[in-house]
Image (spheres, rainbow, N blue to C red):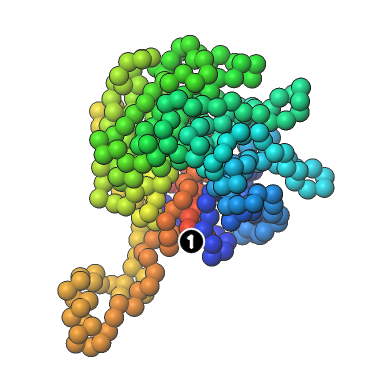
Amino acid sequence: MAAPEVHHLFHNPIADHSFSSDKQTLAVARDSNVELYQAAGGKFTLKDELKGHEKLVTSVDIAPNSGRIVTCSQDRNAYVWERTPTGWKPTLVLLRINRAATFVRWSPSEQKFAVGSGARVIAVCYFEEENDWWISKHLKKPIRSTITTLAWHPNSVLLAAGSTDSHARVFSAFIKGVDERPPPSAWGERLPFNTICGEFLNDSAGWVHGVSFSPSGDALAFVSHDSSVTVVYPSAPEQPPKAMLNVSTRLLPFNSLIWNGENEIIAAGHDCEGIRFRGNEAGWELVGSVETKKRPGAGGAREESALNMFRQMDLKGQTQDDTQLQTVHQNTISTIRVYEEAGGVVRKFSTSGVDGRVVIWSI
């Protein structure tokens, strides 16, 4: 695998990041603003700032085709930003929530987007031509806690959500007059708004941090706070799934995940590195890290055991001089996103984290 492309933008946490379709613009959520960086000469240079939110921006997403940017924040608001000759123009979205907005993603059709919140609702937002504004419909039942993550099905109608009530759910977010009726699938045939197409809970019942549909939409994966990855293969509407496979790990919890084709998942989180999983309906397994680690500093050639470390401290007053992690990221990875793909197979992906880095990885 080629060496990763590391961009250390600043020393603040990055809550979320998103690239434009031409990869020339990078949007990162930093504090209460969204910073826009322009690619030039292999580096990203700060070009613009989107200011409008009053509290921490929790999520940002750039629509690939239209280039519109959607942001959401702990101030309970979401904005759609459109480029104009004089700069970026924000439009406030009527979310109708009384708690923080936690996560936002455009649907593949770009006709609507979904906003998760701490108000136990998901706001599915679409543009109303008559009144010239973005309005929302709420997915409510049976959500019992904060929505932490969302993912759209390729058909732009089904929406997966993970929450702190430990469930991963699949809803219908069908909006009459906006969406075309999707073809029947294992998730369901008739899909009026707020239809529950699936509700899943793994054995440990940990908070769900990330969800993702496979490229075909025929499988759902989610990562939980119990450091596990769960993959669900639906069978038929209102029937138990064909298979629900859980891979427990001894790693720290994952925050985010992507699919690479139908048989590989890459997840990342508190261990500061991407971890590969491979499998199918018969079973899934952990394969290993996406990076080849070398020990930094003077102790590079030797594995330090705890006993040897204390012996050196006692005999010579020496302490371990390695202050860097062996991984590229030096703190928790918040978000992992597909950077370049063809036919569902990922060629490059990007990660951002608490260390202020955005890293582009080649597979």
Q: Residue at horizontal 57%, vertical 52%?
A: 56
x 64%, y 20%: residue: 178
Q: Position of residue 154 (x, y in %)?
A: 51, 26
Q: Which kind of residue does numbered mark 1 sit on?
A: Asp
In this orientation, does residue 8 appear? Answer: no
Name the secondary structure under disc 1.
Answer: loop
Give the residue number, with chain letter if any, for mark 1. Answer: 355
Give the quadrant of residue 280: top left
Q: How many numbered badges does the structure rendering display? A: 1
Outermost residue, front side: 98
- Relative to residue 203, is residue 14 drawn left or right? right
- Residue 63 relative to residue 315: left or right: right
- Residue 215, image x and y in percent? 45, 30
Across and down, in percent, residue 66 comes to 69, 35
46 vs 80, nearest the viewer: 80
Residue at 25% x, 28% y is: 282
* Above or below 273: residue 158: above
Given the current orientation, which residue lies at the most extreme bottom position?
316
